[in-house]
Structure formats: C-alpha cells, structure tokens
Image: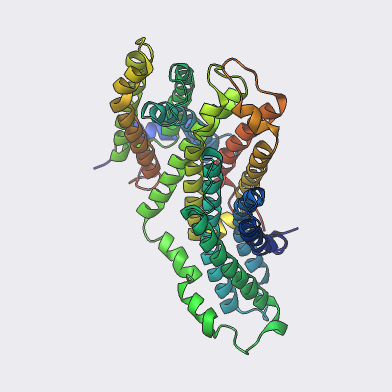
Amino acid sequence: MNLAHLHLLLNHFPIIGTIVALGLFIASFIGKNDDLKRSSLIIFAAIALLTLPTFFSGIGAQRAIRRDPGVSTALIDRHEGAAMLAVFFMLITGALALIELWRRRRIATEKPWSGTLLAILLFSLLTAGLMARVGTTGGDIRHPEIWTVKDMTQETGLSAFVHIFEPTPSKFTDLMLVSKYWWAFMMDLHFIGLALLIGMVGILNLRVLGFEKRLTGASLHRLMPWAMAGFGINVLTGTLAFIGMPSYYAFDVAFWLKILAVMLLGLNAAVFYLTDAFQSVERLGPGEDAPRLAKLVAGSSLFLWFAVITLGRYIQSYADTIH
Amino acid sequence: MVPPTFLRTIEDSGFSTWLRESESPFAFYFVLLFHTFGLALLVGANTVVDLRILGVARDIPLAPLKRLFRIMWLGFGINALTGVLLIIAYPTKALTNPVFYLKLTCIAFAIWIVTLLKDRVFDADLDEPAMMARGATLAKWSLLLWIGAITAGRLLAYTYRYLTYPC
C-alpha cells in the first residue's frame, strides 16, 4: 500500500458519506426523528475528520502519476483546487454538527428549527455538491472515457461558475509562504490550540482516572467546547500549513502516524459518547471511582494526545521518509 | 557587533555539538518534545484554573483545582531544564535575539502570577465568589502572558539573526 492507494481507498468516504448524512438529516425532519438527526450529525463530524487524510494523501497520488505521459497536470490542478474548496466547506459542516450535538444535549429544545440546523443544511448541501465535483474532476484525471469534451479544463455552465471560487493550488501554497510572520502566526495558534486542548481534555481524563476525586465528571465535561475550540484551531492551522508545504508533510512517516493518532482519537470519542462510558462520567460524583470502560477511554485519550504531540514534534526530523 | 565569545565556547563544547548535530532521535528533537510536553502541562493546567476563575464551567468547584498547581510546577520544572538544554544547543541563536528576553520576561511574570494565584486565591481560605473576585485580574493577565510567551517562543524559530556563532 502506498499513498496513491490510500487516496483511492479514502476518497469515497467524503463524497458518499456527505450524501448519506445529508439524506438522513433531511429524513429526520420529515420523519420528526431526533435519533436519526443525531446520527446524521455524528456522521457529518466523522466524515469531516476522515476528509483530512483523504485530502493529505492526494499529494502522494499526484506524485505517483505525474510522470505518466497520459496524465494532464491541468486536470490534476483542477481536482486539487476543487478539493481545497470542498475541504473547508466539509470542515465547517463538521464543526457545525459538533456545535449542534453539544447544544441538543445541553438544552432540551422543542423547536424543530434553529439557526445552527439551517446552517448545517446549507453547508452540507454545498459540501455535497462540491464533493461531487471533487470526485468528478478526480475521475477525469485517469478516465478519458468519461470526458464529455476534448479539453476538460474548458468549463461551462455551473462548473465554470464554481471554478471561479476554487483556489489555484500553487497560488494558495505561495500565499501561505508569503511571509515568515504569517507562518509563525499559524504555528503560534497551533501551539495555543494545543495548550487549550490538552488542558481541558487532560483535566477531565485525569479525574476519570482518579486524580482529585472531589471534582465531578459532569462539571468538568462542561469544558469540552473549549477543548473543541482548541482542536478546531489546530485542524484549521494544520490544514493551512499542509497547503503551505504539501510535499514536506505528505511524505513524512511521523506526519502520517500523527494523522492516524488523530483518527484513533475520533474513534475513541465515538466509543466514549456512544457507550455507557459517557453516562457513567456524567454521573461521576465527588469521591466516586469511574468504571473500567470510562478509565480505559480516558487513558487512551491521554496517551493518544501525547502521541499526537510527540509525532508532530518529530515531523521535521523524519522529513521525506516515504518514497 | 560581534556576539560575545562565550557563546562560541558553549557551542564548541561536546555536549552542545551532540545536542545540535546528533542524528539520534534522543538529541535535539527529544529536548524540544519535552519542552512542548512541559508547555502543555504548565499552560494547559493554568488555563483551566484561569478560565474557571473567569466564570467558565461554574459547576466545577474551585478549591479542588488546587491540585493542578502540582501539574503546573511539574511542567515548569521540565521546561526550565529543557529550556537550558535548548540554550546549550543553540546559545548564539537564542541569546542574540531580543525576542528571547521578551519570552523570558513573559514567563517570569506568568510564573509570578502562578504563585500569586496559589497564595492569594487558593490558600487564602476564601469562599468561591471571593476567590473569583480576587483572582479575576490575575487570571486575565495569566492568559495574556502565556499567549505572549508562546508567541515569543514560536517567533524564536523564525526571527533569529545567527543560527550558530558567525565565523
């Protein structure tokens, strides 16, 4: 398995996943089904997370075929530009889904509609459309049999309109490298996000593991939006840094292990919120000991977050380790 | 102006050269990694205390958060040690950059605030509203100074005049 293989494996998830989640989301309004709505929001968030390695593996797929005479660089650039735009819409959709999931848990709302739900509908519709375009433009690279005109970079109608908003990959990269102070600022935010995230997640995990039992689980869980704010800052600044130096990150084994650890953290969060672990932490009163499952989830969360820091720190030292 | 020669003396030492040039994963990047761990522990724990004092997640009882001061001191200890090692690895790079002194100033004040928070807020036998009232200004400065320290630290990687002693 190489990065091209990984890209071909992952690239179905953002497209089909968004459509499936969107379908469930709309069905939940028609059927007035709250569980279905919750499921669709969870899928949006999960797909947003999976979109990251899909996007990051594109550079590897590009390197694998760029010397092939039958492959057009212009078509690859069009696909990459489409992907850049779709990724940001996907991340916004995922973030909105997490906000709504948090809001629903805190406030027992009777209202069928809210601003957040409307925003999710809007952004997921746009994301689904943009993702479909990413898939089509990606398919065009290697499949001349689906070409409708001789020169596929000549766009008409809706495609031409969407293309106006798509960045040119090399220009986006240059923009990120325009000044060392802009780069320093992004890295600065990445470290501030790290401190915020580790602080908030760390105290909750430590309490579940038995540190300072006077603290209750439910009260500490109120810190999660701040942890997610830190995570959001870091996904954004991390993605922008990747766009700034794509080949520096895309062929680095430490970078990929870091992304793998982030994916496992997503899985860990799913285990936490979708099993008894969450309820047991919410009920965790002063002096009480958490059950084993909750401790296991808290321990793996701490371990994985410190693994993320470790792997991130070793990126420079393992540059260009994947060939 | 030529940098003082003691910087070159440090740089030429075997330990400094090893830290800087060794291919071992336990040399420079290992020190840098623990400097980041220390940052996460110190600033992360302090941020929890600061935000709670400022009214975030009010359900959390304030008094038990005193335990977090131990984590802060652990983080500070790691970073004081790894910070010295980083200076030994690149003395000219750090000590000829004005940003380095800005960073140290931010840290000095932030650590002073850690001690003030402990003595005046957590050890003063106050009730919660009084703790929050007395700690509010300290907490705001604490957050600001840590952002300053991290920012200055990040800038050190990009704004130095000399990487090593000029020949």
Q: Nearer the viewer, residue A167 or A209?
A: A209
Residue B28: x percent and y percent?
Answer: 52, 37
Q: Nearer the viewer, residue B150 or B55?
A: B55
Asked where in the image residue A124 lies, by quadrant, the reply is bottom right
Residue sitting at the far left: B1
Q: Is residue A284 above or below residue B25?
A: above
Say which quadrant the N terminus of chain A sits in: bottom right
Asked where in the image residue B103 lies, by quadrant, the reply is top left
- Whether residue A58 is visible to the viewer of this picture, yes or no, is yes
Residue B94: x percent and y percent?
Answer: 36, 37
Residue A166: x percent and y percent?
Answer: 49, 71
Q: Nearer the viewer, residue A230 or A174?
A: A230
**How many numbered marks does the figure carry?**
0
Say which quadrant the C terminus of chain A sits in: bottom right
Q: Is residue B23 above or below residue B52?
A: below
Residue sitting at the far top: B125
Q: Is residue B95 above or below residue B163?
A: above
Residue A76: x percent and y percent?
Answer: 59, 74
Residue sitting at the far right: A1
Instruction: Give the image's coloring scheme.
Output: rainbow
Asked where in the image residue B145 lies, by quadrant, the reply is top left
- Whether residue B31 is visible to the viewer of this picture, yes or no, is no
Residue drawn at (32%, 15%) of the image: B120
Drawn side of residue A36 relative to residue A232, left or right? right
Residue drawn at (66%, 55%) of the image: A322
Q: Nearer the viewer, residue B33 or B97?
A: B33
Q: Is residue A88 above or below residue A299?
A: below
